[in-house]
Image (cartoon, rainbow, N blue to C red):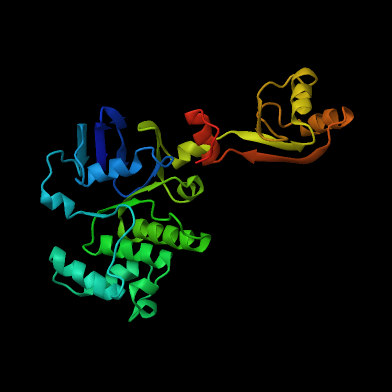
Amino acid sequence: MDYAVRTHNLTKTYKGIPVVNKLNINIKKGEIYGFLGQNGAGKTTTLRMMMGLIKASNGEIELFGQSQYSRDIYKRIGSMIEYPGFYPNLTAEENLEIHRRMIGIENKEYIKEALDVSGLDINEVKGKKVKNFSLGMKQRLGIARAMLHKPELLILDEPTNGLDPIGIKEIRETLINLKNNNGITILISSHLLSEIEHLATEIGIIHKGVLYEELDYKELQKRNKKYLKIRVSDDKKACFLLETKLGISDFEVSEKNIVRIYEGYDDSSRIAKTLIQNEVDLHEMAISVDNLEDYFVRLTGGHNHV
């Protein structure tokens, strides 16, 4: 198995407190790896260690199979960590031209190619100063800059943060195209569960600096539970009836007056009849499947959504 990134007990402490604690992640080449966790979970710290921006307190990072890597290794990596900064009074092409010269790329055509793969319309941005760009356009320009030298690995820290649904969709399509058409390995951190669910082929869940689980998306789909969702007038009474009248014990109240029934949900007509006969109004009943957000909450033992 070829890996673009592997970490071994990667640890970062500040004043003796671990922000990242014995992290072991494995990112296969050609995949989109969703690094998922709440704000403050240790995602950005991990990415900064990978890029050599801060030093690990302990542990090891392998990039393309090398733990003692040279400057040449970083030439194979593009990154956008935290908010991308640009010269606001210059155009996209002018900003990329400065970056091209700084990193020593001779071929000017790389600028047009980078704009193209980032999803930016060259005609739309031509002559337009970056200060007049939307947030989504700036994020895509950040991706263009990271892709300018045609890296094999792209590391992105919260690239959809603050974007509207259209902007999120555009970034998602850009990243999927980079993987499918260019064979780029992508590591993307996010606290947006729904976004990672629609994008990543593999997922690593970090919580309070600890990697709780690492799995591919197909495995996640297998693990997610099917359930009967009911919305009732009185969740306490509904739960009492489920347990005492129907013998169902595997259920939970996910929100006020919304109950998820994981056991015996295929006998929905009997459940509905029992509730109604005992004066519990039934406003909604539907078969559903857990999503990534549900899985995260179950895994971390928390009740607050990311």
Could you tell me if residue 170 is visible in this image?
A: yes
Most extreme residue toward the front, as rendered? 15
Where is residue 119? Give x, y as percent: 38, 67
Judge left or right: residue 263 versus residue 210. right
Judge left or right: residue 70 versus residue 57. left
Pick whichever, 207 or 266, lies toward us: 207
> Which quadrant is home to the N terminus?
top left
The image shows residue 199, relative to residue 165, as above or below, that is: above
Q: How many marks?
A: 0
Residue ID at (65%, 34%): 227
Where is residue 20? Give x, y as percent: 31, 33
Where is residue 49? Give x, y as percent: 23, 42
Pick whichever, 237 or 287, lies toward us: 237
The image shows residue 181, relative to residue 39, as above or below, that is: below
Could you tell me if residue 3 is visible in this image?
A: no
Identify the image quadrant of residue 13: top left
Residue ID at (39%, 32%): 208
Pick whichever, 303 or 281, lies toward us: 303
Pick whichever, 175 or 47, lies toward us: 47
Where is residue 201? Give x, y as percent: 41, 46
The image shows residue 118, relative to residue 89, as above or below, that is: above
Identify the image quadrant of residue 217: top left
Judge left or right: residue 180 versus residue 244. left
